[in-house]
Image (tube, rainbow, N blue to C red):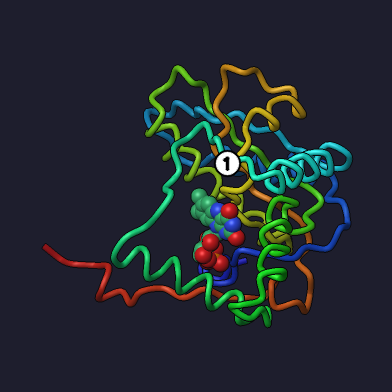
């Protein structure tokens, strides 16, 4: 597959088929993804793949936590609100996505269900968790996780698999550490859900847009 095809073809998938992904496939994807660049070649990532019972357990515990009104307590600071252009794009994404899924703005029950589906990895059979050592330079390690995580998404796409970075997957990091046997000293940066995309559902096929190049690029 051409690199351009992968870059233009990848999208965040929000409905997966339950078919398990062979662990061998995950290993092969990670084997190549680990060639992603990192600051000073520190390769600060530690990667844990959760599937089967473990993934189900995580989803169930996240939903219980969210339904009981527990506020997210991520290891890595998360924006609670956006302003200006960022806010407009964030709100625009939400509106476009829910509209494509046929969810009306005032349909509170459907919106809540979408929110809970997110905690269950949108039905994905597995999730790739990235943790870093709390002692390392956190912001730079997070950049490096972005680097390997994005690489992994393209490699998965090349294998016909869908992915989505999920901030929701790290809202309750203590649960992730308990279920996946990750030491408390580690920081959970992000989970990327992975699986076969649903072939027809709008939540699986939805495409976001981008600002025009003239708006984001300036030659000094
Ligand atoms: C760090 C990060 C966290 C994200 N967390 C979520 C999330 O919790 N829920 C969700 O539906 N999408 C999440 N996304 C997906 C973004 O909404 C998506 O990447 C963006 O809208 C662009 O769309 P595309 O990936 O389809 O190109 C996240 C993406 C990133 C990079």
User: Does mark 1 have its CB less than 8 Å from ligand 1?
Assistant: no
Q: Is residue 209 left or right of residue 131?
A: left
Taking 18 as reference, is 212 above or below it? below
Q: Quadrant of the C terminus?
A: bottom left
Q: Nearer the viewer, residue 147 or 32?
A: 147
Residue identifier under label 1: 71
Which image quadrant shows ligand 1?
A: bottom right
Taking 41 as reference, is 158 above or below it? below
Residue at (37, 28) in percent of width and height: 40
Residue at (59, 66) in percent of width and height: 10
Quadrant for residue 77, please give it: top left
Graded by Cα atoms within 10 Å as few (under 14), some (14 to 19) or many (20 or more), the crowding at tag 1 reads: few
Quadrant for residue 164, please give it: bottom right
Instruction: Name the spot of residue 74 as percent of width and height, x first.
Output: 54, 36
Q: In the structure shown, which secondary structural element does the residue marked by tag 1 occupy?
A: loop
Does the image show residue 113?
A: yes
Instruction: Name the spot of residue 213 as percent of width and height, x first.
Output: 30, 74
């Amino acid at each position: 597959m051409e690199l351009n095809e992968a870059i233009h073809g990848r999208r965040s998938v929000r409905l997966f088929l339950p078919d398990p992904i062979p662990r061998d496939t995950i290993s092969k994807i990670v084997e190549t993804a680990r060639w992603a660049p990192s600051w000073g070649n520190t390769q600060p990532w530690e990667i844990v793949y959760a599937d089967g019972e473990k993934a189900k357990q995580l989803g169930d515990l996240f939903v219980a936590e969210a339904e009981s009104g527990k506020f997210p307590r991520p290891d890595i600071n998360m924006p609670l609100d956006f302003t200006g252009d960022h806010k407009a794009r964030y709100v625009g994404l939400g509106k476009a996505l829910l509209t494509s899924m046929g969810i009306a703005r005032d349909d509170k029950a459907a919106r809540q269900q979408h929110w809970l589906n997110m905690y269950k990895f949108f039905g994905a059979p597995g999730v790739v968790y990235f943790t870093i050592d709390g002692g390392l330079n956190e912001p730079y390690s997070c950049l490096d996780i972005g680097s390997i995580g994005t690489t992994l998404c393209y490699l998965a796409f090349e294998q016909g698999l869908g992915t989505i970075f999920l901030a929701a997957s790290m809202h309750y990091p203590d649960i992730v550490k308990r279920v996946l046997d990750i030491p408390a000293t580690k920081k959970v940066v992000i989970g990327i859900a992975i699986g076969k995309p649903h072939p027809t559902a709008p939540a699986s096929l939805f495409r976001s847009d981008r600002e025009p190049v003239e708006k984001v690029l300036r030659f000094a």
